[in-house]
Image: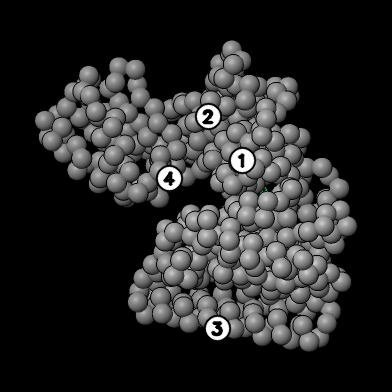
Amino acid sequence: MKFGGSSVGDAAAMRQVARIARDAIVEWDDVIVVTSAMGRSPNPRDQVKVTDTLLNAARAAANGDDETFKRARRELADKHHAAIEAGISIPDERRAIGDEIDRFLDGFEMLCASVRVLGEATPRALDAIAGLGERMAARVLAGVIRSEGVLAEAVDATEVVVTNTQYQSAAPLMEPTRLKLRERLLPMLQAGKVPVVTGYVGATEGGVPTTLGRGGSDYSASIVADALEASEVRNFSDVDGVLTTDPRVAPDAHTIKILSATEMSEMAFFGAQVLHPLTILPLVEKRIPLRVKNTFNPTHPGTLIVYDNAPADQPIKSVSVIREVAVVTVTGRGMMGVAGIAARTFTAVARSGTSVYMFAQASAEQNICLVIPRAAIERVRPELTSEFQYEIRKGDIDAISVLDDAAIITAVGAGIAETPGVSGRVFSALGEQGINIIAIAQGSSECGISLVVKGSAANDAVRATHRLIA
Ligand code: ADP
Ligand code: ASP
Ligand code: MG
């Protein structure tokens, strides 16, 4: 069972998690909890999201600011100590876990002070700092679960999830990870304990802390499930499962009962925040069912992800959005018939370390357009300009232009590819709202259709497309 940031946002939420864990033990023999860092709390006076706070403090320190990380330390101390005070009933435990939190926060301050002196936060340093949130949350949550009368013990994934050295989006090395997870967790389960494992973090073979990328606790839970050959994964968030779209954009969004793994992956890849895009990957081979549920409404069945086709009662099942993307267009009459321009464009973009969300080519081959994260423009533009300097000088390529405020809207559903007229309906829906479509692509797995619109039109485009779902 994985619990996201808002599920552990304060003591009340953690107690709710503890009750869900206690009930699960009755239903299942062995239960493993994977936790995120403490996130938003329903209390309006506590808006601290721990991972954001850690990363902002580290970045501010790199810019020479030594106030932000000191303030962050106080906020993080307040948030964790408040949860300990209100959530853990045994005085000795309160003291011991409180001391552990203070040691982590000492480490945080030391790391930030070093970053400030160096004037730079390397991806490696950012990972050492960003992962502290989960490591603190696991200790507090294990304490709260014990206070609820259930044996539980915090486990640092830095000791059991082995990754490569791609800091900030590390990939697990599954062989050693499986071994270590089994070695560590099986004896705990045999002793009747609930392991409370940190999500998001891992460590290299040399023991240097890494993270799996933002939102990565979902992925952690699947990695643990694969290693332990779990019967089921339950992913708990603050909404009733996977919804037809982001409820913050369209309040009439509703729960999708069953989704295929392909549909879920497509949605997650194209921006549905509810699951990390790689969550499904470790589950596919053993076909481990995944349920997405609401911590605050645990009797709601939520969404079940299955490995066969899901019922396709309508072609479009969901609409998601990726914001803050840029459209890079390579244009030129001289491109017509020139073999390899597309290949060179991709190679140049790959050299900059950027992954491309979407790609479209005009029929007369006079332009190629790529949709990338906005933050990657500074890396991509110089690579493309240098790749095509010869063609640009000759006038074969006119320009490399960038539209830097766009969004990708994706409609997902396995029926989209085989149902005639779906794209037409989407285009009309946007047309009726006066929304201009900048580029179009069929999603990677043929179960989605993606459109690029101006950033300012994103929410209207989501709502217009969402109205096509019955
Ligand atoms: P957690 O911290 O539990 O991992 P996240 O904030 O990462 O939670 O993901 C849950 C949030 O994702 C929801 O609160 C919702 O606002 C947002 N969201 C976006 N798209 C969807 C969707 N299609 N279905 C459900 N939630 C979505
Ligand atoms: N705490 C991490 C984040 O905020 C990982 C997660 O919550 O899944 O990105
Ligand atoms: Mg999440």
Mark 1 or 4: in front is 1
> Disc 3 marks which residue?
106
Labelled disc at residue 374: none
Q: Is residue 359 left or right of residue 340?
A: right
Mark 4 or 3: in front is 3
- Image quadrant where residue 115 sits: bottom left
Mark pair 3, 1: CA separation: 41 Å
Mark 3 or 2: in front is 2
Mark 2 or 1: in front is 1
Q: Helix, strand, or loop for circle 3?
A: helix
Disc 3 to disc 1: CB gap under 8 Å: no
Mark closer to the chain start, 2 or 1: 1
Amino acid at circle 3: Asp
Q: Residue at 77% x, 66% y: name it.
A: 190
**Image location (x, y in percent) of residue 346:** 31, 37
**Image location (x, y in percent) of residue 58:** 47, 71
Q: Is residue 95 visible?
A: yes
Labelled disc at residue 373: 4
Amino acid at circle 4: Pro
Mark closer to the chain start, 4 or 3: 3
Mark closer to the chain start, 1 or 4: 1
Instruction: Please identify the residue farthest to the left as the structure is shown.
Output: 394
Labelled disc at residue 445: 2
Between 93 and 246, the residue placed more toward the observer is: 93
Mark closer to the chain start, 3 or 1: 3
Q: Helix, strand, or loop for circle 1?
A: helix
Mark pair 1, 4: CA separation: 28 Å
**Image location (x, y in percent) of residue 177:** 55, 60
> Disc 1 marks which residue?
284
